[in-house]
Amino acid sequence: MSRPSANSRLLIVIPAWNEEAVLGDVLESVKVEKPSFADILVVSDGSTDATAVIARAAGVAVLDLPLNLGVGGAMRAGFQYAQRMGYDYACQLDADGQHDPTEIETLIETASSEHADVVIGSRFAGKGDYQARGPRKWAMNLFSFILSRVCHTRLSDTTSGFKLYGPRALSLFAHNYPAEYLGDTIGALVIAARSHLVVREVGVQMHPRAGGEPSHNPIKSALFLVRATLALTVALTRPGERITQAEEENA
């Protein structure tokens, strides 16, 4: 993937479910710190609070989904919007304030230097002090081991929600992005690799969570291990998607 030019268009897609408590501050930060050629889309994923209202008041584009589809379903809607509106690149950013919008440039630089279609912003690649513990750490280590081999590159953070997608990935995922549990992370990486997209990762700095509850207690971590293992098993049974000639020419 080449570096976006002055004429390129990047869409920052923020899936959000009931994030009224923090979304306003997060959007103000993203608006100030994003690349100049980037626009912002909030996908309100069946929110029952004022998430969509706050996003519109901030002056960003909004998709207000009538039902909660999960992150995968919200991101697919975002990819379809990006493709329909003529964007060349998309960046997934969480609504809880953990992802630093200044690091989008880091993802872009890595995509350019590594000719990557998908770039993961990793919490464990030597930048920052984020740590996972217990069953969650065991699961992440297992998934990194397996998916590094599937994607033919070393990966340390396969469940990161901070990613950049180039033209080929955007075209692929607008029509084939898994909506099941962890489909937006593990499932999407398997699809990308089996569709012969280039996946890379780079270390990024993370902010403390602005709202919501972290899922680090033992019960939630054990449940994550079981559900994520099932998600990986399902993902590995998926066939790849063929990239068309038109998509190759857009890369």
Image (spheres, helix red, strand yellow):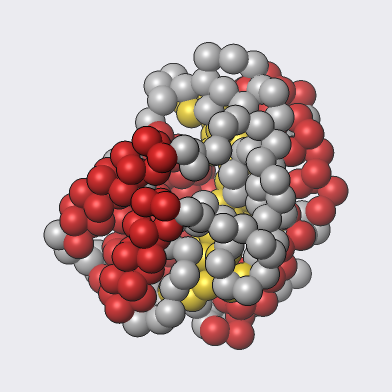
As displayed, is residue 71 above or below residue 117?
above
Report whether 204 appears left or right of 6: left
Q: Nearer the viewer, residue 197 or 235?
A: 235
Q: Nearer the viewer, residue 83 or 160?
A: 160
Q: Which residue corresponds to the image point at 19% horizontal and 56% vertical from the top-left?
A: 233
| Image location of residue 80, percent across then percent down | 45, 45
Q: Quadrant of residue 28?
A: top right
Report whether 113 appears left or right of 33: left
As displayed, is residue 224 above or below residue 114?
above
| Image location of residue 161, percent across then percent down | 51, 52
Q: Which residue corresponds to the image point at 76% horizontal and 24% vertical from the top-left?
A: 57
Report whether 167 appears left or right of 96: left
| Image location of residue 145, percent across then percent down | 33, 73
Residue that lies at the very extreme toward the right in this rendered image: 32
Residue that lies at the very extreme toward the bottom in this rendered image: 113
Q: Which residue corresponds to the image point at 56% horizontal and 58% vertical from the top-left?
A: 131
| Image location of residue 225, percent across then percent down | 31, 48
Q: Quadrant of residue 141?
A: bottom left
**One can see residue 173 in this view:** no
As displayed, is residue 118 above or below residue 109?
above
Q: Nearer the viewer, residue 148 or 23?
A: 148
**One can see residue 201 in this view:** yes
